[in-house]
Amino acid sequence: MRAQPGTARRTVLAGSIALALLTTAPAAHAFSQRPQTPRGSLVLVGGGLKDDNTQVYGEIIKRAGGPSARIGVITAASVPESQDPHAGDPDLCSNSACNGAYYADLFKRHGAADAQWLSLDIDHVADADSDAVVAQINSMSGFFFGGGDQYRYITTLLHGDRHTDSKALAAIRAKLAHGAVVAGSSAGAQIASGADMVSGGESYEGLRDGSAPGYYEDPTRLAYIPEGGFGFLRSGLIDTHTGTSGREGRALRLAADTGHDRVYALEENTALVVDHPGTSREHLTVLGPNGVAVLDLRHARTRTAAAGWTLRNARYTYLTDRDQYDARTWAPQPAADKRPLTATNADPVPACTDVFYSVANPNGTPYAFRTTARALAATRAQNTATASTFETGPRFDVTFRKSGGFSAWTTDGVNAQTLIDLRINIDPR
């Protein structure tokens, strides 16, 4: 069985598009061409969307019209067919056309009336300004962007460093404004970002070295595209594969460096559903087995000294299945079946010496940041807990603190699931 397309590795794809560019910020493009009050919605998945996730696939299809849903599948983030050595093997292929057919079949199996691959990729860049492709887009009620390398979406749909809407993207934008659903997983979720879209990097190197505009061959270097992606969701930065790749650190550093006060950190096989994106009524719901962290830097302070970079008083809210969030008021609302957790155990928080799941640690554990936060929430023995990075030079300590406004929520009365307003400090040593 062929592996799921678009599944992220622990590195960022680089080099395959010959991207020796964006080491400085490109000129801004006009946002005036973009509708500001869409009637449609977004379904953004943190990657690793499993074939049997009926909850998320069902939500996309429901929002696209249910039994009459027609889904346009865009997989331009994948390697093009011309660069795939296994293009002729349906069991091994992993390219745009092959992955597009894969997702189209999945959507049909989950109940869509029709799903079609749109020939938008590196092999067919001209199709992004094709009237025939625009007509195909206009016949759809929903769209799904697959995973891979988000810069390929900029190359194919935003005219590369010109960063202007192709006819195809303009048509998708118009469909969103008139009620269509736009979904994506991994790079397909990341590309929904506004300004300063992350383009690569690991947490430790980001904390140590800071971020830089551009797209780099070094997959550990924290980098971002100043002009961003499609700009469908602008109320916060977006990051993906958060727990499985330990990306909380890079998300906090990038937000602090670029002046953003909020990050939506999406976990795998779980969706952030956004109603009324880009409006004062923007409202978010989490669906799936993992969660979405909202990183709040409104009151955070940073400092860089000889010892390294320091962050004080960031806030961490972790939302799980069916929790809601009001982007305008910053207010989370746990799902109706969850109740406040009263910590009754006196167990200490287990030691964590690899809080960001380092690629250098063969014995690391994914979701270490979340695991530490939940363990602290569930114990009455501690109000703070400190975890550290695997790397040294410097080693960074991450301190979690239960503040006066902190609360944890549970469905079983024992385990902390949803967390609200846990404070985060990061210090070098």
Image (spheres, rainbow, N blue to C red):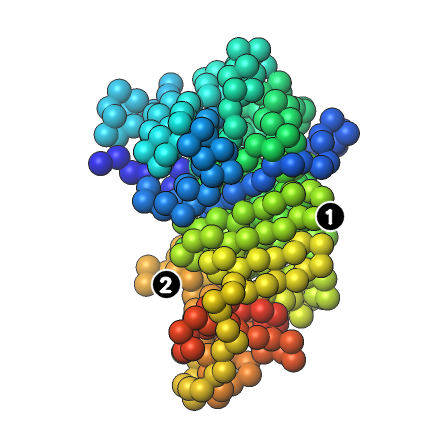
Tag shown at residue 61: none
Q: Nearer the viewer, mark 1 or mark 2?
A: 1
Real-space Cα distance between discs 1 and 2? 39 Å
Res. 29 in view: no
Tell me what residue is drawn at x 33 percent, y 59 percent: 362
Q: Which residue lies under the disc numbered 2?
A: 365
Give the amino acid type for the residue marked by disc 1 in the picture.
Ser
**Dot 1: few (<14), some (14–19), or many (≥20) neighbours within 10 Å?**
few
At mark 1, the secondary structure is: loop
x%, y% of residue 287? 47, 52
Tag shown at residue 280: 1
Q: Quadrant of the N terminus?
A: top left
x%, y% of residue 382? 51, 85
Tell me what residue is drawn at x 63 percent, y 78 percent: 403
Q: Quadrant of the C terminus?
A: bottom right
Res. 49 in view: yes
Q: Is residue 204 left or right of residue 427?
A: left
